[in-house]
Every structure is written in C-alpha cells, then in structure tokens.
Image (cartoon, rainbow, N blue to C red):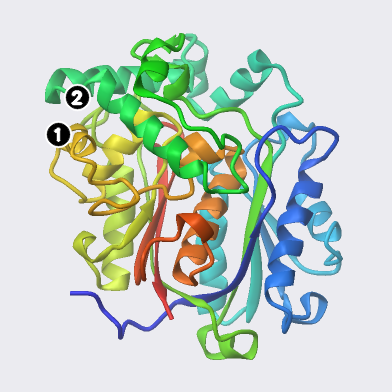
C-alpha cells in the first residue's frame, strides 16, 4: 500500500539539466551552469546567493579535463563562489551520492538549502582515451592491468546471466529499443531517434555478447537539483517533490570474491535501505530510473530491485512490463542508453527525471499521475549503488 504519511527527509524545490550530447567548445563547468540556470528559472522565489547554503558536485574523472578540485569553479560559474563546496566521486553514481550526503546535511541541521549536481565533459577525448579513463572504475592491479574494461566485465556478466537464466541477446536489444524510443520525447537527450531490434543485433560487437547499441555512449552533460528542509519548501514553491527514501550499498570488485556475477549485492543493499526508509515496497512504485550503461545492467536491476523474480528480467522485457505504458515504466527519460551517460551527471539526471514526472512537467513522456518513483545509480560493475525514493507532494 502506498504511504502518504512518511515524513520526508528533504524536498526538491527545483531541478535543471543541460542538453546532453557532443557539446563542443564548452567546459563541464559551463554545462553545469546551463543546468543550474534552468533550475533557478523554474523557482523564481529562490534567491541563489542568499538562499543556497552549499553546493555538492558529482564528477567521476578529473583526468578528462585535467582538472582537480572542480567544485569551487562550478559554484563560481553560477555566482556562488563564496559558498562551501565539495566534489563527490563514486564514478557513475557520483551525483546520486552527492544527493545522499546533501540529505544528511539537511537532516543534520547544518544547512537549510543545498544545490547538488553532476557534470562530465567527455567527447573532446578520443574513444580510446575515454575508454581508458572510464575503465579506471575497474580494479587496477587485477582488472585494468589484465586488460579488462567495463564493457568487457559487463559482457562476462551478460554471458553468465544468459547461461543461468536463458536471457537472450534479443531481450537485451529490446531494452535498448525501449530506451531510445523514450528518448525521442526528451528534448535533453543525446539520441532522439528510434532504433530497431535488427539494428541493435547487427551493430558491431564491442565485447561479446554486447554490441554497440547495447552500450551507452560517451557524452557531455550536466544535471542538478535543489533541495531544502521540508518545513521551508513552501517558501519557494507549492510544486515540490518529497524525498522519502535513501539507501547505499557497495561490494568488492568483480575479480574479488562475490556471491554472484548476475546479482549485485550493492543494489539489493541500497534498495533495501531506500524501501525501508520510505516504508514502501517495489509494488508501490509508479516508475523508476535505473542504471543501464549496458543493457544487461537494466535487466539485472529489475531483479535486484524487486520488480520481478531472479532470472525473470528478460521474460518481463518480452512482456513489455517496463515500457512507458507498461506495468512499471522504467527509464522514461531514455536512460543512460538513450539520454546519454556523462558519468558524473547521470545520478542527478535520474533525479531530474523523477522531479519532472512527479510535478507533471515531463511533456510528451509524462506518465499518468505518478505518486512514487525510484532512482538507482551504479558505480562500476555493481561496486557501489545509491538508490532514492521520491513522492509527489
């Protein structure tokens, strides 16, 4: 039964996003400013310099722009250079982790209002350079040094899921097709073009069985959200979103001892924390944004988040359960696959989509009267996960 009484941890009063894709001539801080100014415009009662107490920024790879200590520059780019800032890094879940720690800042009484966000500038690097940098998310002595990349590790996971549960390459292809279809209606998405199962299946092999269209692309982009303590949300807007659940989990690298290659303990732990805090169950959700850097990741997320039983993710794809008009819409934004995956920004981008859906601002991709949504951001190949649950006010 959906709860309407759980006390919110914090409230989202606004959010913004840059356009995702190849953004030549711009630094990550400029993309962050693009997202931030959209958030400011959505909330005219907010005075950023007066009201925002701190800025938490998620960014995965300082090597991409040869720039460390990025958060002061990001804050300065939007006129908040005198505010406390911090960079948070947990690769693909960086800005989701930033939100979790900002929530702690609100709950601890340190701050009233915080801007969190994430940004990554990637496309100025060659594909080879980008892959090498991105694969720093894998363990250096036992994975990177042996030639492992994130596509390669996820290909191993896909093969094992296929062996154990009969998951097919066509089912993975259908995830890509679904998410590209959703991205068509997202004006911020990198790939606003539908693809077919045949196109996915015939695309070049990246790491067998994963093909080009099974993999998210190298992307530039930024997203952000502004949160505050619940009792002051109405000071800024009547159309806000309540954060009612948060959870986090981590695990050893794949090369280390894991209970399973086809189920991520980190996702289960994070979702258990989020469900428990929010006092909801998977059946109470109206939509979810999940990590789909590779199509197999989304199928495993269905199972680990409790959307279906273990091994049934592929069959549920065949049934259309996670389409926008299905039983539980997943990745209405287009996901990392269709929207794009500027690594440090992706966790905040998921929250941006949840905010839009729960405030009826998602345009053509708006689902009907959603009440509760979940986000699931993963760093590395199931190494760390942050999950949040949101409720319509």
Where is 208 relative to 26, above or below?
above
Which residue, given by chain and number where applicable, does mark 2 sit on? 167
Give the class, few, some or many, for how many residues have Cα within 10 Å of label 1's Cα (few <14, many ≥20).
Answer: many
For the point 71% across and 27% down, the residue is 123
Determine contact: label 1, label 2, CB under 8 Å: yes
Q: How many marks?
A: 2
Q: In this view, does 104 lie to the left or right of 31?
A: left
The front one of 348 and 384 is 348
- Marking on residue 96: none
Q: Position of residue 392 (x, y in %)?
A: 41, 75
Q: Is mark 2 on a helix, strand or loop?
A: loop
- The Cα atoms of the two marked residues, 1 and 2, are separated by 8 Å
Q: Where is residue 365 in the image (x, y as percent from the top left)?
A: 46, 54
Where is 344 relative to 61, above or below?
below
The front one of 288 and 343 is 288
Q: Is residue 252 left or right of residue 160?
A: right
- Marking on residue 311: 1
Residue 107 seen in render:
yes
For the point 69% across and 66% down, the residue is 39
Q: Where is residue 298 in the image (x, y as percent from the top left)?
A: 34, 37
Labels 1 and 2: the sequence-earlier one? 2
Where is 260 relative to 328, above or below?
above
For the point 54% across and 23% down, the residue is 135
Placement of the N terminus among the 4 image quadrants: bottom left
Placement of the C terminus among the 4 image quadrants: bottom left
The front one of 162 and 320 is 320
Q: Position of residue 245 (x, y in %)?
A: 37, 68
Quarter of the image where one finds residue 340? top right
């Amino acid at each position: 039964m959906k709860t309407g009484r759980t006390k919110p941890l914090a409230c989202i009063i606004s959010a913004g996003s840059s356009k995702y894709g190849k953004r030549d001539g711009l630094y990550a801080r400029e993309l962050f400013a693009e997202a931030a100014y959209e958030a400011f415009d959505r909330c005219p009662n907010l005075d950023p310099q007066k009201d925002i107490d701190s800025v938490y920024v998620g960014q995965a790879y300082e090597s991409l722009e040869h720039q460390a200590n990025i958060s002061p520059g990001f804050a300065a780019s939007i006129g908040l250079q005198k505010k406390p800032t911090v960079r948070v890094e947990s690769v693909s879940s960086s800005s989701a982790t930033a939100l979790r720690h900002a929530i702690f800042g609100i709950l601890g009484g340190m701050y009233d209002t915080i801007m969190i966000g994430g940004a990554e500038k990637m496309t100025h690097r060659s594909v080879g350079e980008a892959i090498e940098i991105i694969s720093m998310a894998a363990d250096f002595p036992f994975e990177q040094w042996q030639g492992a990349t994130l596509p390669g590790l996820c290909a191993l996971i896909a093969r094992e899921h296929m062996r154990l549960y009969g998951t097919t390459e066509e089912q993975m292809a259908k995830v890509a097709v679904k998410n590209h279809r959703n991205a068509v209606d997202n004006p911020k998405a990198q790939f606003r073009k539908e693809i077919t199962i045949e196109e996915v299946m015939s695309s070049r092999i990246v790491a067998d069985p994963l093909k080009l269209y099974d993999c998210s692309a190298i992307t530039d982009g930024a997203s952000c959200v502004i949160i505050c303590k619940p009792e002051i949300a109405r000071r800024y807007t009547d159309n806000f979103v309540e954060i009612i659940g948060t959870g986090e989990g981590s695990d050893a690298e794949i090369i280390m001892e894991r209970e399973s290659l086809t189920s991520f303990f980190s996702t289960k732990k994070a979702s258990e924390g989020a469900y428990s805090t929010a006092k909801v169950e998977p059946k109470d959700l109206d939509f979810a944004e999940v990590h789909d850097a590779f199509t197999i990741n989304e199928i495993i997320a269905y199972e680990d988040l409790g959307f279906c039983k273990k091994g049934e993710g592929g069959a549920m794809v065949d049934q259309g359960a996670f389409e926008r008009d299905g039983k539980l819409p997943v990745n209405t934004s287009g996901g990392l696959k269709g929207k794009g995956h500027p690594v440090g920004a992706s966790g905040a981008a998921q929250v941006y989509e949840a905010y839009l859906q729960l405030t009826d601002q998602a345009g053509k991709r708006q689902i009907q009267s959603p009440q509760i949504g979940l986000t699931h951001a993963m760093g590395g190949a199931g190494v760390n996960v942050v999950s949040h649950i949101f409720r319509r006010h």
